Image (cartoon, rainbow, N blue to C red):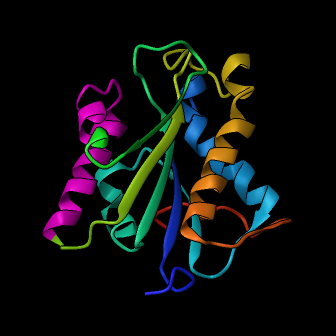
Amino acid sequence: MSNQFQKVMILGVGCILYSDEGFGVRVVQEIQKRYAFPENVSVVDGGVLGVNLLGVISQPDHLIVVDVIRNKGNPGDLYRLSGKQIPERIRAKNSLHQVDFLEALTLCQALDKVPETVIVGVEPEDIETLGIELTPTIKSRLDDVIGMVLSELDHLGVSYTKGNSEDVPRYPI
């Protein structure tokens, strides 16, 4: 199947009420503001829906997830996880939405519809303080992670243009 016909989803996850925890959602919001995509690409604010995302994440052929990744690094460190790295890193996760997300990805296997998945993200500075603003360190990494997402699209042969798209869909609609 040609990549122009394969479904690609860019999924931001996290809770925007806890500072850097909302990084993935903030990235997809910025991507949606800055770029327009062909019909086979969807940009989704998945929030903290976890297992409830099963129906959504079982649809694409390729899934690019954006999230914070606690990997005992320094705040602002960038990560790209794929293949077997994903379960290893998520098993040691520190927030419920990440555990639920892994369960949803695992349940896709039961449906025999597991998308080729890559997770890109950043080591957070603060995911415990109640507040809707990202810390300055993490906010400064927004453009870098957007670049990582665009690089994944380039690798898949997906075209995109600068310019506004529709609002980011939230699930459930």
Against 121, residue 31 (above or below) is below
- Determine the residue positioned at 67% across, 79% down: 38
Q: Is residue 44 magenta?
A: no
Q: Is residue 160 left or right of residue 122?
A: right
Q: Is residue 144 left or right of residue 11?
A: right
Quadrant assignment, res 31:
bottom right
Report the magenta residues as a range: 87-110
Viewer-nearest residue: 79 or 27: 79
Which quarter of the image is occupied by the N terminus?
bottom left
**Percent position of residue 62, x then y:** 43, 66
**Percent position of residue 87, x then y:** 24, 40
**Mainly helix, strand or loop, the magenta region?**
helix
Viewer-nearest residue: 84 or 173: 84
**Percent position of residue 125, x then y:** 56, 15
- Determine the residue positioned at 36% across, 62% down: 116
Q: Is residue 93 magenta?
A: yes
Q: Residue furthest right?
A: 163
Against 114, residue 127 (above or below) is above
